[in-house]
Image: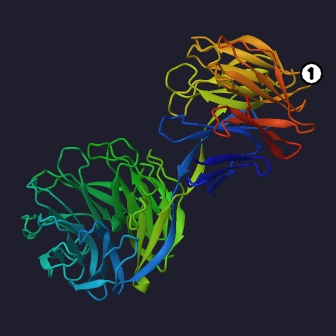
Amino acid sequence: MDIAVATRGTQSLALLLGNEQGVFTIQASYDSGISNPPLTLIAADFDHDGRSEIAVTYENTDDIDIFISHDTGTFTFDNSYTVGALPQYAAVGDFNNDKQPDIVVTNMWDGTISILLGNSNGSFATQVVYSSDWYPIFVVVSDINKDNMLDIIIASRTADRINVFLGYGNGTFRDPMKYATGSMPYYLSVGDFNNDTYLDIVTSNSNSNDMSILLGHGNGSFSNQVRYPTGSLPQSILVDDFNNDQRLDIVVANTNNDDISVFLGNGNGSFQAQNKYPTGTSPVSLAIGDVDNDTQLDIIVANSGSNDISVLLGFGDGTFKNQSRYSTDSQPNSIIIGDLNNDKFLDIIVAHSVNSSISVLNGYGNGMFTSRTTYSTSAGALSSVFADFNNDKRMDIAVICSGVSKVDVLFGSISQSFVKQTTLRTGNGSRPRSLVTGDFNNDNYTDIVVANSGTNSIGLFLGYGNISFTNQTASTLGYSPWSIASGHLNNDALLDIVVADYYNGSISVLVASVNTSFAQQQVLLTGVESKPYAIVTADFNNDNSQDIIVANYGSNTISLFLGYSNGSFSSRIKIPNGYGTNPFYIVVGDFNNDSKLDFAAINESTDNLKVFLQTC
């Protein structure tokens, strides 16, 4: 159970997260755009996603704001691990079959790779080093020889070839097998290009401005390369099916041309001529995923020269929309995507090699992203990978800090914040004071009814189940409706409404009809100058009929009206609350576990809460 709080003095909303042990942590505050003190709030699941949203009214406004609580996620530095000289890229996999993610890192200056075996608490063993060709750059992990043990493939920039390390499944690897590529291979990717169930390899060759296709034999060996021209200085290269034809396609970033090339696959290991799409300046890194939840693959590009990322949304036929761009910190060098905050939307991690940081941009699931959140690293962040390293069901990040030969590990944790989703208009001068939610038209969607103190009316907003609502339908009633509650007052399966009329010294009972209108059934008096402030419905006498209880601010009393199950009620039962207390809120519950409902009154002038236990 969590708690949302409307704070009048600071004009903000706060969220306290519970730990199921009665302890709460202040998690988030929202004050952006709140120009008036929040007055009341209510929680409900308006979009049927299993998470509560909140609706808020404010003093001296004619609006209701709907907020969603969004887990943006946050990351905290845990530890650094030493690897080889000038590490470049990393990949994650379970190399020793212990169900813990391990890390492999390429070390450019000493021609090695480092294996860091992971422990269940998120820590890693000291590196184990394997020699490779000189200047290893990019690395991928996959089961190349179909033995259910992960293997490692690296691109060696100066040797003009790839190295394949076959794994034994216990965290160790064979000496590498080596295969020729074009000049200065930088990135590589794997996939089955000819539909023979064996994994193949593609490399981007930065000096010869082409890509190499090496078809696999399924035993860890590969055919001689076949090369296709790309743009100038190709770097990042990825594989996926962009046109939904069950054949793998390729996308490559052309750094000197400020564009990307898409090669549609023929399914036999060959590819069609490239189609190019503009990006920002100097694209260097790519990621693929469905960022707008339309089931079509999109492409995200890190632009090192223009300090931003490009998002190209896919049409599903192998073509893409024009780019949308989002700012990053200086010189984004690497980009990866995944669901970092468990909201089922893809997020972006960008590594910056200049200012020693990574940026996280949370996705909204519609192809758009939040502004970046920046996390510092030990040194220039060349690249990153993510996995749940410490088994807490949150994604963590490992960052390659090239200048200090370290891998930084940042643990992920929950970080809730409020995001304003929509605003409902209640009419000029309406001054909404109180809200109640429920399914008032029995369509299984949550609706809102508001008490408009300025126009002496209640307003009904019918929900569509997606945090959008109809325009208000207003009904006029007493003088200055202050508080509102709902319940099945006449036991007919339709929700009815009760309203406290502050300046009338009364409450109005409104019974619902099948056309979602409300008829005033009865006016119940709460006393002269009583100023009824808060109202609640509950069954206090266990007769299966809803009763009404009211806190009277002006007369320092509580009024109880017992229900007759037909929408009518008994005369007032007056309960003294104490001189000068000014009760303004009521809470109902069985506080002593005797199967009888009790209530508590919150008192403004005496700054206390008074509990009333039912004795009969």
Task: Say which residue appears at 21% left-offset and 83% top-offset.
Answer: 132
Task: Say which residue appears at 64% left-offset and 23% top-offset.
Answer: 542
Q: Relative to residue 340, is residue 351 depicted above or below? A: below
The answer to whether residue 427 is visible is no
Q: Relative to residue 4, is residue 488 depicted above or below? A: above
Q: Position of residue 595 (x, y in %)?
A: 63, 33
Q: Position of residue 87 (x, y in %)?
A: 35, 81
Q: Position of residue 387 (x, y in %)?
A: 37, 64
Foreground pick, 183 / 330: 330
In the rendered structure, the answer to whether residue 595 lies left or right of residue 374 reads right
Foreground pick, 600 / 183: 600
Task: Say which residue appears at 25% left-offset and 79% top-offset.
Answer: 157
In the rendered structure, the answer to whether residue 231 lies left or right of residue 122 reads left
Q: Position of residue 531 (x, y in %)?
A: 87, 27
For the C terminus, which image quadrant?
top right
Amino acid type of the residue tagged 1 in the rendering: Val
Q: Quadrant of residue 484?
A: top right
